[in-house]
Image (cartoon, rainbow, N blue to C red):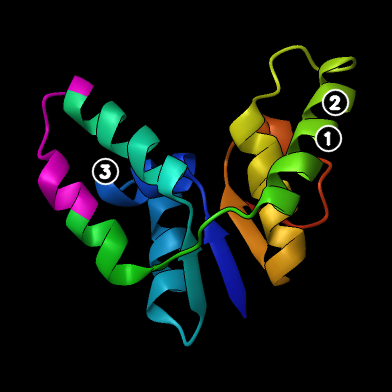
Amino acid sequence: MKYLIDAYAWIEYLEGSSKGQKVSEILEAENEIFILPITIAEVVSKVKRKERNFELAYNVMTSKSKIFEMTPKIAKNAGILHAETRKKSPRFGIVDSTLIETAKIINAKIVTGDPHFENVKEVVIL
């Protein structure tokens, strides 16, 4: 199975929470794991703000997943999805729409606990 792990899930995993345990199970199984570069930035920022070891977080993420570079087509589709979704959900982020569009292209499930993803079929909610 293919999984695209978002910042929320990585933070839970790095903190060793009960939700992070589910992420750990996905990482340890025979799955193909992907991460977007922007997700790395989100996690490093969060870890740094908490004054924790952001280098360790970076190394864990990059060693346990494949980096997927966004294409112009994904960017265009993410922009359209973002604009449409913001009409109903004003706090829906551009990174969220990018994750959804990437998951569609690579046929992966997004691993997250973010409530913005509750009605998205490409999602595994923690």
| Amino acid of disc 3 | Glu
**Disc 2, SS:** helix
Q: Residue at x 64, y 47 (%)?
A: 99
Mark 2 or mark 1, whichever is nearer to me: 1
- Seen in the picture, residue 49 relative to 29 is either above or below; the reply is above
Q: Given contact means CB atoms under 8 Å apart, are the residues at marks 3 and 1 in contact?
A: no
| Amino acid of disc 1 | Leu
Q: Which mark is residue 41?
A: none
Q: How many marks?
A: 3
Does residue 4 appear left or right of residue 116 in this picture? left
**Disc 1, SS:** helix
Dot 1: within a 10 Å radius of its alpha carbon, few (fewer than 14), some, or many (20 or more) residues? Answer: some
| Amino acid of disc 2 | Thr
**Disc 3, SS:** helix
Quadrant assignment, res 54: top left
Rendered location of residue 61, percent (x, y): 30, 58
Residue extent of the magenta highlight: 49-58
Label 1 sits on residue: 81
Q: Which mark is residue 15?
A: 3
Q: Quadrant of the N terminus?
A: bottom right
Separation (CA) of disc 2 from disc 1: 6 Å
Rendered location of residue 101, percent (x, y): 74, 51
- Seen in the picture, residue 11 relative to 23 is either above or below; the reply is above
Rendered location of residue 29, percent (x, y): 45, 83
Q: Which badge, 2 or 3, comes first in the chain's sequence?
A: 3
Label 2 sits on residue: 85
The rendered magenta stretch, by its main secondary structure, is classed as helix
Whether 53 is among the magenta residues is: yes
Dot 3: within a 10 Å radius of its alpha carbon, few (fewer than 14), some, or many (20 or more) residues? Answer: few
Q: Residue at x 13, y 51 (%)?
A: 56
Q: Given contact means CB atoms under 8 Å apart, are the residues at marks 2 and 1 in contact?
A: yes
Q: Residue at x 39, y 59 (%)?
A: 21
